[in-house]
Image (cartoon, helix red, strand yellow):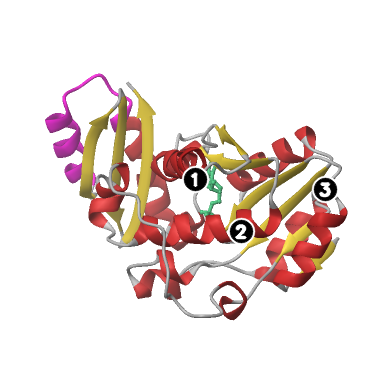
Amino acid sequence: MRILETREELKEYCSSISDISLGFVPSLGGLHAGHVSLIERSLKENEATIVSLFLNPTQFNDKSDLEKYPKNDTEDLQVLKDLSVDTVFLPTSQTMYPHGEVLSIIENSFSKILCGAKRPGHFEGVLTIVLKLLNLMKPDKIYMGEKDYQQASLIKAMIDDLFIDTEIVFCPTVRESSGLALSSRNKRLSPEGRARASKLYEIITQEISLESMDSELSKEGFEVDYLEMWNKRLFVAAYLEGVRLIDNVMK
Ligand code: AMP
């Protein structure tokens, strides 16, 4: 497996394979079966696949969330090796932000509601890092998870609006058998918390009013950050044991 660390290495490699199809899966690390589903889809649909592992500091408005993020490069690289991923991009912050945070991408509509309203600056950080990565790689396709539906939609909007030559592929949310959406942050829950966390999906898939869902969630010990319908989809963010969980379902 090829591990690239600098922008120059990445650009040089990508131009050397410009005649074959390239799929790209961006990740913060802490890989689990949700990430694996995106990577497997890219491996199937493209001749080459690059996975990036970069815990992007600019998308963390809460610095303690960044510090506690469960990421382990050695374990992640082993997962990628086992999947026969050809190339991993593992940059440092200095590599991705050589001039610091002097410039960022701002979306003025959908990024201002739901997670955008609760995590100021979060989507600016996401859009900026994804644009930087797309500029370096120029992939044919980028694979994003529906678990982070607002994020994937905003990246789609950026691609459309900035005329970027990359197709975005939305991939379905991978869940535990309990219904809990897989997330790197689930690792921070206690065994009891993890069992309780599955109530989130159970409650939002019920045919009851938003008010009833809200009170059911509170009864189960969740601190609801938001619970809102947008475009026939129900979005939720809630804290359990101090861990922020998000999910969304079509209604
Ligand atoms: P992250 O490392 O959290 O930035 O996630 C990298 C990509 O994996 C994003 O496109 C996420 O939406 C996607 N992803 C994370 N969890 C899941 C999941 N449970 N099912 C499907 N995709 C996921």
Query: Closest to the observer: 218 or 168?
Result: 168
For the point 30% across and 42% down, the residue is 110
Query: Dot 2, how many residues are within 10 Å of its Cα: few (below 14), some (14-19), or many (20+)?
Result: some
Give the labeled residue for mark 3.
18
Q: Amino acid at mark 3?
A: Ser
Q: Label 2 to label 3, Cα distance in Å? A: 16 Å
Judge depth for marks 2 and 1 and give the one in front: 1
Could you say whether the residue bearing mark 1 is in a helix, strand or loop?
loop
Give the labeled residue for mark 2.
133
Residue 188 belongs to magenta span = no
Q: Which mark is residue 162?
A: 1
Q: Main secondary structure of the magenta part?
A: helix
For the point 57% across and 67% down, the residue is 71
Query: Dot 1, how many residues are within 10 Å of its Cα: few (below 14), some (14-19), or many (20+)?
Result: few
Q: Percent x, y for residue 129?
A: 52, 61
Indicate the quadrant containing the C terminus: top left, top right, bottom left or bottom right.
top left
For the point 67% across and 60% down, the residue is 136
Q: Label 1 to label 3, Cα distance in Å? A: 21 Å
The answer to the question of whether label 1 and label 3 lie on touching residues, with beta carbons closer than 8 A, is no
For the point 17% across and 43% down, the residue is 219
Q: Which residues are magenta?
A: 203-220
Query: Closest to the observer: 35 or 154?
Result: 154
Query: Closest to the observer: 79 or 123?
Result: 123
Residue 99 visible, this orientation: yes
Q: Percent x, y for residue 174?
A: 55, 37
Q: Quadrant of residue 53?
A: bottom right
